[in-house]
Amino acid sequence: MNLDLKNKILKKITIAIDGHSSTGKSTLAKELAKKLGYIYVDSGAMYRCVALYAMQNNFFKPELQEQLLVSHLNHIDITFKNNAASKSNHTYLNGVDVEDKIRKMDVSNLVSGVAKISEVRAHLVRIQKNMGLNKGVVMDGRDIGTVVFPDAELKIFMTASAEVRAQRRFDELSKKGQNVTFEGVLENLQKRDNDDSNRSDSPLVVAENAKVLDNSTIDRETQFKLALQWAKDAIENKN
Ligand code: CDP
């Protein structure tokens, strides 16, 4: 049976979640994937891995040596594995668990500069498209509904006020014991939103047909119910 026909019978869809930084995209994506039995892919973690690799190899001298990084892309192996202790997916860079490292502020401060390089994007987008070939995937990022899966049956664009987002991310990082300030977190997410929205290659925009979800004032459970209903409708309407 060909793949298209099989997917129609199983009615598996692709769910693309994009939006501003720290809007809880990965939380919602993980919840949807778990409920639907789909694969979850954190595309931001992949850009963070490339930024960490550049840091670890001293490619910032002091400006990022873009061509040097591009020439190393084939040496950057990124995988996701379930971690039994935390019962969540961890990100591995060349076989090493870097889940904590890639979430730190030093990486957050450099990642958008790495993500604007077209060769980096083309390389990661190729891998991401492959991950979605069989459908049944929830992927979150900045260009999932526009570039990676423009034909996704459900596209969600998440946003919230900058202060609410900074408070959530500040609480999350503080809980992990990271030494951060609210102002530092706020400044980082505003700068990344600005860089991500204004880059020339695959800027962050609301994809055509995306459902905009502003979660400044709605709680996690309400948001999940709403998104799950959208997913059920999209599965039902799949022809
Ligand atoms: O968790 P948060 O929303 O703060 O960010 P992330 O999803 O981990 O993404 C980190 C950075 O990677 C973003 O600020 C973008 O610069 C870049 N990114 C991208 O350009 N395209 C994607 N599909 C995902 C992330």
Image: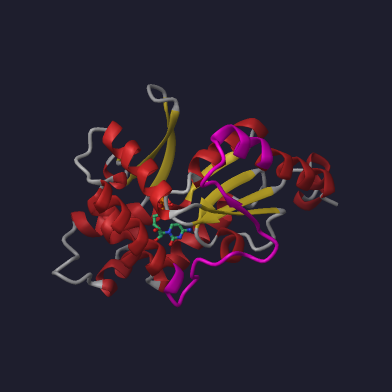
Residue 78 pos. (x, y %):
39, 48
Q: Which residues are magenta?
A: 197-226
Residue 99 position, x and y percent, is: 33, 39
Where does ligand 1 appear, by image quarter? Answer: bottom left
Q: How is the image coloured?
A: secondary structure
In front: 130, or 23? 23
Horizontal relation, residue 172 to residue 133: left or right? left
Residue at the top extreme, as displayed: 85
Residue 49: x percent and y percent? 33, 52
Q: Is residue 49 left or right of residue 55?
A: right
Name the residue rendered at 68%, 56% in the picture: 152
**63 left or right of 111 in image:** left
Q: Is residue 140 above or below residue 210?
A: above
In this rendering, would 117 be left or right of 55? right
Q: Is residue 142 visible?
A: yes
59 in relation to 38, above or below: below
Q: Residue at x 54, y 43 (%)?
A: 217
Q: Residue at x 42, y 73 (%)?
A: 118
Quadrant in the rendering for residue 59? bottom left
Q: Is residue 20 magenta?
A: no
Q: How many numbered discs sit on the rendered protein?
A: 0
The spot of residue 147 in percent (x, y) is: 57, 66
Residue 76 showing in the rendered view: no
Q: Nearer the viewer, residue 109 or 65?
A: 109
Query: Which residue is drawn at the image coordinates 30% and 64% (left, top)?
Result: 72
Spot the residue most to the left: 61
